[in-house]
Image: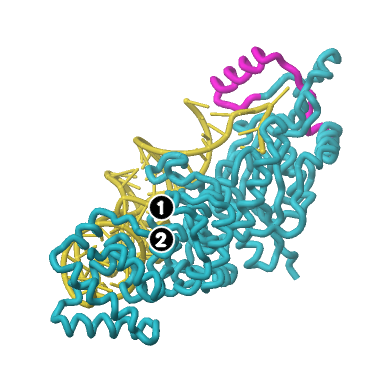
Amino acid sequence: MSQPIITRFAPSPTGYLHIGGARTALFNWAYARSQGGKFLLRIEDTDKERSTDDAIAAILKGLSWLGLEADGEPVFQSKQQDRHVEVAEQLLASGHAYRSYATDEEIEDIRNNARAAGVAARYPGRDEPIADEFIDRSVVRFKAPIEGETKIADLVQGDVVIRNDQLDDLVLLRSDGSPTYMLAVVVDDHDMGITHVIRGDDHLTNCAKQIQIYNALGWDLPYFAHIPLIHGSDGAKLSKRHGALGAEAYKAMGYLPEGMRNYLVKLGWSHGDDEIIPTDKLIECFDVSGINKAPARFDMAKLDHINGHYVAESDDEDIINALKSLIDENEFNPELSYSAELIDLNALSANLSFLKERSKTLIELLETAAYLFKSTPLEMDEKASKALGKEGVNDILKGILPQFSDLQEWNRDAIEGLLKDYANEQGLKFGKIAPPLRSALTGSMVSPGIYDVIHSLGRERVIQRLEDVIKA
RNA sequence: GCCCCCUUCGUCUAGUGGUUAGGACGCAAGAUUUUCAUUCUUGAAACAGGAGUUCGAUUCUCCUAGGGGGUGCCA
């Protein structure tokens, strides 16, 4: 029996859950779920200056929206401080760490010299103890090996070998006695029983240093998988312009969690030529071996396409719930062309079949349905008023109006029959009657199919809107 | 500077020591259609460059270039 795998996502709470972090979380989550293991969350708040409760809340919210629920309560790194200090003491006692003190100027000199020599920096206290008077102001540094090399057997990057003379004596405990990230990750990953560390490859060099700490402690190594970072559409570092937004921002743009997950997991991971990978399939076939080594660029157009697929395929109930949640937050990006208070979920629900198949995002869906909610008399856009102003249009609309009043059953087929019959009787091409109707009923020349528009509006509103535009 | 990682159509990618180098998004054209979108068909579009290994390299090795990361009492 192999032991169950345990992964973790370990964000530092200095801002929202950005898209790169979301993907890292997704990979960890997907791997744990695919292996029947556990996915844990750890908040790396050892930097008290920069960590905020708001950021913690935003990260939790983002993960929750994406459906990446962690197993168990999150671990707060700051609460493990005593344990970190204990391990540092242990390292000190075993000769794998030392107390060090130097002024900023001295440190700068040391670094310049080391850089000139092409090796990593070593600090006072390494070879012989520092003077007692400096103890209070000292930091605890790791006494990294100088000879030899450290190998990272990375699941994504392959074997990466770094010479030990390139790895410096990092700080374990700050002069105020608080632990640094380097110490804390190692201790916490060990204590939490993490078997697979999947994280951004900006940690690759750090990883070698961490391995040295594991070794000094005599601890077993977890498996490491360093995934490439996401770049912006121009290849440069991801910026807001490229989509380096918080997960919440994507919700506001009307993306669905499942669409987001599908797009994100495809960014740097593949399973043959598969494009559409719903969650159950993802859990079934995700594997670290499918992760690509090259960094990927974020592409909104493809996100749209994939999301559009999920909008069209999702159950009505799921779409309505997602819409509800979006409306509750009252954050729409871009903003709606009408007041969100006018949205009628029942009306939406009754007409989702044709609405969702023409929308890539929930925002688009809401805009497609705008004709249902806008206040009347409708404001006509330029093309619509032009279509209404055409020769003969007034008579056509006048002729149709009573037909709607007389229609027995208000259903789609009957409406279609009515319009076709009317066109035949009048000897008019359908192209003559659809545009003015569309304009009168929606205020626009772009809308869902005319039968759907008429049907969804209902008899009274159809009649009312026609009367609004018909000139006596 | 030094160390490490990366490089297949514009983008995300599949792929193998011998393939017409495949798929998807986007783009273009066409079909369908009452508009838009969808859908369908077709098309243009890639192995970064240079050496080497080999009968044969996109695939293996090295170099160069370009991109990214690290080099913090940040994480």
> Helix, strand or loop at disc 2?
helix
> Helix, strand or loop at disc 1?
loop
The reply to whether residue A191 is in sight is: yes
Colouring scheme, one of rainbow, by chain, secondary structure, one colour: by chain
**Magenta part of the chain:** A94-121
Q: Nearer the viewer, residue A250 or A422?
A: A422
Amino acid bearing label 2: Ala
Establish if B35 lies above or below A82: below
Residue A66: where, in percent of width, then height? 59, 58
Residue at 29%, 85% in the rendered image:
A417
Residue at 62%, 15% in the rendered image:
A109
Mark sitting earlier along the chain (2/1)? 1
The reply to whether residue A159 is in sight is: no
Residue A160: where, in percent of width, then height? 56, 46
User: According to the colouring, which chain is yellow?
Assistant: B
Q: Residue at label 2? A: A370
Residue A431: where, in percent of width, then height? 19, 72
- The answer to if A11 sits in the magenta stretch is no
Establish if A252 lies above or below A131: below
User: According to the colouring, which chain is cyan?
Assistant: A
Circle 2 chain: A
Quadrant where the image shows the C terminus of chain A: bottom left
Circle 1 chain: A
Q: Indicate left or right for B60 with B71 as reference.
A: left
Residue at 73%, 44% in the rendered image:
A186
Amino acid bearing label 1: Ser
Establish if A237 lies above or below A227: above
User: What is the number of the mark on residue A337?
Assistant: 1
Residue A339: where, in percent of width, then height? 47, 53
